[in-house]
């Protein structure tokens, strides 16, 4: 009898915890953790484990204002690379960022990771959004 | 059985003693070696000839020429890179910066980074790259010279570099090579791994502390 009560309470607790994690949170977690793996293999060499960049050669990924202002362009930058000058963290960076042949879902994963790490907090960037943004790439 | 145990005990003891009385740890001398026998005072003496780095003629980011003479009396670390390298170079440079920062104020130490793309990496390009990397002074030289010479010299550093592959990328491994004052190879370290580069920093300290008698053998 006692055992049943304890088991019942335990089950209730589990349900409570699971339901607290909203669908959105779960989606975010999925994107974020998959993104960290893409980041390690495709971005970390240049941008660093903490998104710190490399001196004046590689821009850091810690400029939240830049990321927010260029949110719709981020997908294009990842997919097709960057050329020319950009001003990030009050410094001018020039040169080339190589293109990355990634699927929209991978771009969404890695962007969700980057824009919610290193002091950034921009929420989930979904693969649907990435597909829309990619269509507008110049 | 008892004899065997005794023998094991003796071996263990001997090894233990050897460990304690052993000389200070020194770095190995790598590369191929040959022996040369010569007559000294009527006696034949056999010397070991270690692989050394041959003469080099390069130009650094300041436009100054770099030859073995400029490196004389220096311990140095060599690596191979190119400024437009998208793959492993940034992480190598990040790690090499740690080496630079550890020794930039100490005499008798240099870093020599050979570009494997001299056509693009001219002196002004190298200077700009050095500035962006935040390095100054004469501790870290980015050097360029004829491509053939660089590909040949890479072999004597035990490093492999290859021509551009069909995708337009140079293939090169990311090793940092530690060279002593006698131009002998004393260590190779994977420049893409932070922990190996930490070991390199420790080994440089050890090599700097190596007594002259040990190095002139």
Image (cartoon, coloured by chain):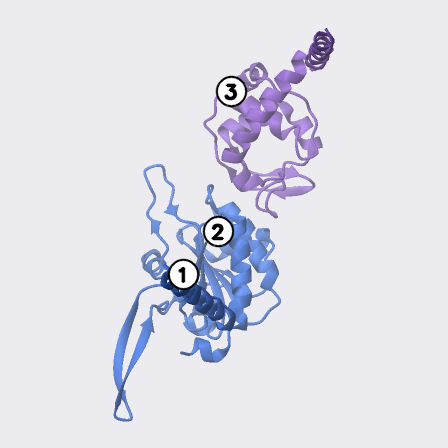
Tell whether label 2 touches label 1 (CB within 8 Å): no
Which residue in the protein does label 1 denote?
B5
Q: Nearer the viewer, mark 1 or mark 3?
A: 1
Q: Which residue lies under the disc numbered 2?
A: B191
Mark 3 and mark 2 in contact (Cβ < 8 Å)? no
What number is the disc on residue A113?
none
Packing grade of label 2 (10 A; few <14, some 14-19, many >=20) is many
Q: Secondary structure at mark 3?
A: helix
The chain letter under disc 2 is B
Q: Colour of chain A?
A: purple
* Chain hosting mark 1: B
- Among all residues in the image, which is located at the extreme front? B2
- Asked whether residue A95 is in view, the answer is no
Q: Which chain is blue?
A: B
* Residue A104, numbered label: 3
**Chain letter for mark 3:** A
Q: Residue at x 44, y 75 (%)?
A: B215
The picture places residue B9, in percent across and down from the top left corner, at: 44, 64
* Observer able to see residue B80: yes
Viewer-proximal residue among A32 and B71: A32
């Amino acid at each position: 009898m006692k055992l049943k009560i304890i088991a019942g309470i335990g089950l209730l607790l589990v349900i409570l915890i699971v339901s607290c994690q909203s669908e959105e949170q779960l989606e975010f977690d999925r994107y974020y953790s998959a993104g960290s793996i893409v980041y390690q293999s495709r971005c970390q060499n240049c941008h660093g484990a903490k998104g710190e960049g490399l001196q004046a050669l590689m821009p850091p990924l810690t400029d939240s204002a830049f990321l927010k202002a260029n949110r719709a362009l981020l997908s294009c930058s990842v997919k097709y690379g960057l050329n020319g000058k950009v001003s990030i963290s009050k410094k001018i960076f020039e040169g080339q960022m190589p293109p990355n042949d990634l699927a929209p879902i991978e771009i969404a994963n890695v962007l969700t990771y980057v824009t919610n790490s290193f002091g950034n907090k921009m929420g989930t960037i979904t693969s649907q959004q990435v597909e829309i943004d990619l269509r507008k790439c110049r | 059985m008892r004899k065997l145990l005794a023998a094991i005990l003796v071996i263990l003891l001997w090894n233990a003693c050897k460990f304690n009385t052993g000389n200070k740890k020194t770095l190995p001398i790598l590369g191929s070696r040959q022996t040369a026998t010569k007559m000294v005072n009527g006696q034949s003496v056999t010397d070991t000839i270690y692989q050394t780095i041959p003469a080099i003629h390069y130009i650094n980011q300041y436009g100054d020429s770099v030859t073995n003479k400029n490196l004389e009396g220096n311990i140095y670390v060599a690596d191979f890179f190119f400024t437009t390298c998208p793959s492993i170079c940034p992480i190598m440079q990040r790690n090499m910066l740690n080496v630079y920062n550890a020794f930039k104020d100490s005499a008798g130490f240099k870093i020599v980074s050979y570009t494997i793309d001299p056509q693009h990496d001219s002196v002004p390009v190298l200077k700009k790259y050095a500035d962006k990397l935040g390095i100054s002074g004469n501790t870290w030289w980015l050097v360029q010279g004829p491509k053939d010479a660089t590909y040949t010299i890479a072999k004597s550093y035990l490093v492999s570099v290859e021509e551009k592959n069909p995708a337009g990328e140079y293939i090169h491994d990311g090793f940092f090579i530690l060279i002593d004052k006698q131009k002998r190879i004393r260590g190779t370290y994977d420049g893409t791994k932070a922990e190996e580069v930490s070991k390199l920093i420790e080994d440089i300290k050890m090599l700097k502390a190596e007594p002259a008698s040990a190095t002139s053998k």
